[in-house]
């Protein structure tokens, strides 16, 4: 199966699917799974909810896949979807969403930064307060550098500029979607996915929860300055036309300034008979205009690239292997291994 464009069928059974993208997370996976199993048992006894976890191995280079496959389906069903290569977290999230079978969906990282115990709080807001999208946000960014915080502020300012639905600043990928919100997300056809944006764009009743992310349990973050820049650019151009609008505004501003300057030159020549010294001002003008035009061409190029990417219509990911293990207690069926070609 692949990230096909047609609406995906709604899941049959009611319950909660926990989607966890994993990329080189072998070290902390067993621990995470034990915590999730405990959460699932609690949800089973207190809320009568069926749970499953969908691990999406995003082409890990270490033994993550082997570790994931050995995890016991105790207290919850376990799916292991392994992608044919590293497609990136957004693609892995979509693969997880496509394979989730139980109505509501929780997305969380596999590096231990998202506390599994918080899932019960998310579920409480979903079931007791009728919220559809319960998203978590970092309580504060005190431990992050000033430049990073400024960059993030600027990013969201641009992203939300003139937008009808604002994407909340600081919101993370750790969130719960009710069955109808999950099915809305499944209907979005775009390939270039900016998950945080989409989950907010669909609307319904959204609820924010503040939490303190834990340090990584092992391994290291795959994000560096370059990939974060890439994600931001992607998110921006996939989600808003603000950069194009900036181009228009800048063009207008420069044209207005040039006009004023031109009027001044004419005025001085006519009234005072002074001839304005030419070379430096012409040079500066040419440089500024040239620079601005190149930047704006680049911005246009970003959007054209996006369009090309979308019309090519390639699947977002390919599944190499898919395994579903039923919970030993809730289901007597033996382990099933589904080759994806047959799906
Ligand atoms: N991840 C993934 N594919 C990638 C990179 C990351 O599936 O190409 C997963 C990773 O295993 C983790 C989650 O995405 O579960 C978040 O990644 P990371 O911790 O590196 O990001 P950060 O927490 O620093 O934003
Ligand atoms: Mg992390």
Image: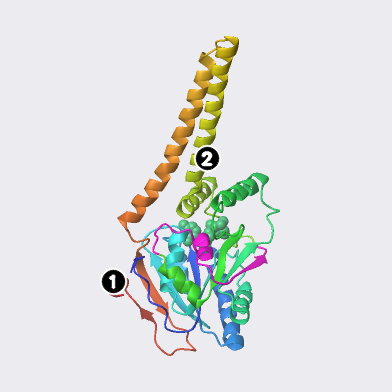
Per the image, the residue denoted by label 1 is 341
Let me know if residue 206 is in the magenta part. Answer: yes
Quadrant hosting residue 141: bottom right
Residue at point 57% right, 9% down?
273
Let me know if residue 299 is in the magenta part. Answer: no
Circle nearer the N terminus (2, 1):
2
Q: Is 81 left or right of 135, judged from the image as shown? A: left
Element at badge 2?
helix
Q: Please, is residue 277 above or below residue 211 in the view?
A: above
Q: Is 272 left or right of 334, judged from the image as shown? A: right
Q: Position of residue 222 (x, y in %)?
A: 52, 54
Label 2–label 1 contact, CB within 8 A: no
Q: Which residues are magenta?
A: 189-213
Residue at point 56% right, 88% down?
48
- Mark 1 surroundings within 10 Å by alpha-carbon count, few (fewer than 14), some (14 through 19), many (20 or more): few
Per the image, the residue denoted by label 2 is 249
Element at badge 1?
helix
Q: Is residue 220 visible?
A: no
- Front residue of 312 and 276: 276
CA distance for labels 2 and 1: 51 Å
Q: Is 48 left or right of 322, judged from the image as shown? A: right
């Amino acid at each position: 199966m692949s990230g096909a464009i047609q609406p995906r069928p709604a899941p049959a059974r009611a319950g909660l699917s926990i989607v966890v993208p994993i990329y080189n997370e072998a070290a902390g996976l067993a621990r995470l799974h034990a915590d999730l199993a405990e959460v699932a048992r609690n949800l089973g006894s207190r809320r009568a909810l069926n749970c499953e976890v969908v691990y999406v191995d995003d082409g890990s280079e270490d033994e993550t896949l082997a570790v994931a496959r050995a995890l016991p389906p105790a207290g919850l069903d376990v799916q292991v979807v392994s992608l044919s290569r590293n497609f990136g977290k957004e693609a892995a999230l979509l693969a997880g969403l496509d394979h989730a079978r139980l109505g509501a969906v929780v997305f969380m990282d596999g590096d231990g930064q998202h506390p599994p115990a918080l899932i019960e709080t998310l579920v409480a807001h979903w079931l007791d307060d009728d919220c559809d999208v319960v998203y978590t946000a970092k309580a504060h960014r005190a431990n992050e550098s000033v430049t990073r915080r400024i960059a993030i502020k600027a990013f969201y300012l641009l992203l939300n500029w003139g937008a009808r639905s604002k994407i909340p600043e600081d919101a993370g990928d750790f969130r719960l979607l009710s069955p109808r919100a999950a099915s809305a997300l499944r209907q979005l056809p775009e390939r270039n996915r900016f998950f945080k944006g989409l989950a907010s764009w669909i609307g319904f009743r959204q609820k924010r929860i503040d939490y303190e992310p834990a340090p990584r349990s092992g391994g290291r973050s795959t994000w560096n300055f370059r990939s974060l820049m890439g994600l931001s650019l992607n998110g921006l151009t996939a989600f808003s036309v603000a950069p194009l609008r900036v181009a228009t505004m800048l063009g207008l501003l420069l044209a207005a300034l040039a006009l004023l300057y031109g009027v001044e030159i004419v005025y001085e020549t006519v009234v005072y008979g002074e001839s304005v010294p030419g070379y430096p001002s012409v040079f500066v003008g040419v440089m500024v205009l040239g620079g601005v035009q190149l930047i704006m061409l680049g911005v246009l190029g970003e959007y054209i690239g996006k369009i090309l990417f979308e019309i090519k219509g390639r699947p977002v990911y390919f599944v190499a292997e898919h395994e579903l293990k039923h919970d030993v207690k809730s289901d007597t069926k033996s382990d099933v291994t589904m080759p994806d070609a047959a799906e």
